[in-house]
Amino acid sequence: MVNPLSPGLWRLLAQGEIAPATADRMPLILLVTFLSVMVGLWLLGALIKRRAAALIDPAIVRSFRRRISGNLTMCLILALALLVDRVYTVVFFGLVSFWALREFITMTPTRRADHRTLFALLCVMTPLQYVLVGFNLYELYTVVIPVYGALFVAARVAFTDDPKRFLERIAKIQFGLFICVYALSHAPALLYLKLQRWDGAQNIYVPWHGSPAGLLIFLVVLVQLSDLLHFVWDRLVGKHVIAPHINATKTWEGLIGSACCTAILAMLIHWLFPVTPFTWMGAGVMGLIVSVMGASGAMTMSAIKRDRGVQDFGTLIQGHAGVLDRIDSFCFAVPIFFHVTRFFLIAPP
Amino acid sequence: MLGWVALGRGMTRTAIVFMKFISRPALVLVAKILSGATVRWVDCQPDTCQRVYFANHTSHLDALVLWASLPRAIRSLTRPVGAKDYWTRGPVRRYMASLFNAMLIDRTEIKVHSNPVDAMLREIGLKYSMIVFPEGSRNLTGELGEFKSGLYYLGKKRPDLELVPVYIDNLNRVMPKGEVLPLPLLSCITIGPPIWLESGEKKNQFLERARQAVLKLKEISS
């Protein structure tokens, strides 16, 4: 009746009657804990804003709170989607991809000749990628965009008989497609992985029966924490700016500090909430990878924004940072996290 | 027999009204989603007073999107001006035009006794506002073209109308000339402070001033 591998969290709750399932409820517990911590930090920010305006620069507090509230919204929607079924998670990420790609193309100058290519990307390629993920066709969803998509874009633009800045145009379109759609689509794909874990006592790999939702939640939590830690480290001890022309606030201290802290936190989370098939060392390495990749993503997107001379991707939406600003670090961390997990822990067929 | 015919007509009419009841909000929703339009009112507030919104024209969607982005109460009082030859070609376009209550102006046959300005003023009466594109036809370059004189005569014949400049950004990328499928990018509509025809102002002076008003919004929006 109840599929033990099903990632729907409400099903996991329902399983409580059948099995002593605290382990299965772990993803939910982790998510709730994380959300409460975030809400707590947000409230703390509100408190600081009122009481201790003299001690800390109010601009920092404001920026900190905005960061949290944006992430919180995304996490809440994701939590709702996970709570119902993994299909909704796929749909959720599909919509995020669509919106991000839309923002990306809006910001990137293209020429009239690119119209039909862009239409194909937004309205055909993006849904197709998520349909492939939803049907768990690993051989297809990892190949369709980098092989067929990339070649299609180049050829389709060439067919339109407009040679002006040709290479620049196809590079922009391909990059947008790769980051906004391909990279992000690996997040819901995590839910379909069948993994094994290392059993230290027997020195063999054994099948892992945890909920794959745990993997995704683990990743989301790490990315968010890494972002926040990076921000805090930058503001507190940051001295050496990495690339002042690209991002004036990201420092080496922030990068290294947040990477180490995220690794430690990853191990801590792994110890408190065993939601992943990783060993404790594996969890630490994952934390390190996620943090470094997240920072790289944020830097890359900053570089694109500086190149285009915009403050935020969502400047068209007044006052708000766009979807792309929220998911920049996530986009870079997801495919690597997915690949490393799958490479080392995929269960043999 | 005649009763049946009358009943049939009545039902058809009811069906049409009902269809419009459903499809008008649907059209507005589709227009909003497709264009992802953000609307900014700069030194100007939504108002039900009679206005002439004049905007740059880069896409067929301009009138629809601008109309859809107005608040509902104002939308029902605002009529976009469209070219008759374009909006009466085929049943779909005709239906669309009837949905957003377009004022269709014949641009091929302009005579002294039936000039478009008089026709427009007759149509709006003392109730409606309207949306016009004083460049005449869509410009392809993205640069703002010269304004036709219609706006000047509107201001001269009805000095009480508020002439409100509007700048529509990015819609030419959503649906460029010659394309059928709209690309759902994000666009931005900036609505600026109204202008009026000053006393003794020459036609060319006024048209240039109106054009500058739109250009100023372009600078704000980018």
Image: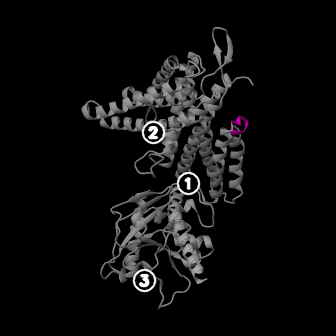
Q: Indicate the position of residue B24 as horizontal and vertical percent values.
A: 51, 65
Q: Do labels 2 and 3 share a chain?
A: no
Location of the C terminus of chain B by quadrant is: bottom left
Based on the picture, tell me whether residue A318 belongs to the magenta stretch: no
Task: Report the front residue among A126 and A56.
Answer: A126
Q: Which label belongs to residue A198?
A: none
Task: Identify the secondary structure beneath mark 2.
Answer: helix
Question: Horizontal placement of A24 versus B126: left or right?
Answer: right
Our reading of the magenta stretch's main secondary structure is helix
- Residue kind at label 2, given as amino acid type: Thr
According to the image, label 1 marks what residue?
Answer: A109
Based on the picture, tell me whether residue A137 belongs to the magenta stretch: yes
Task: Identify the secondary structure beneath mark 1.
Answer: loop
- Residue kind at label 1, given as amino acid type: Pro
Task: Identify the secondary structure beneath mark 3.
Answer: helix
Residue at position x 72%, y 45% from top? A148
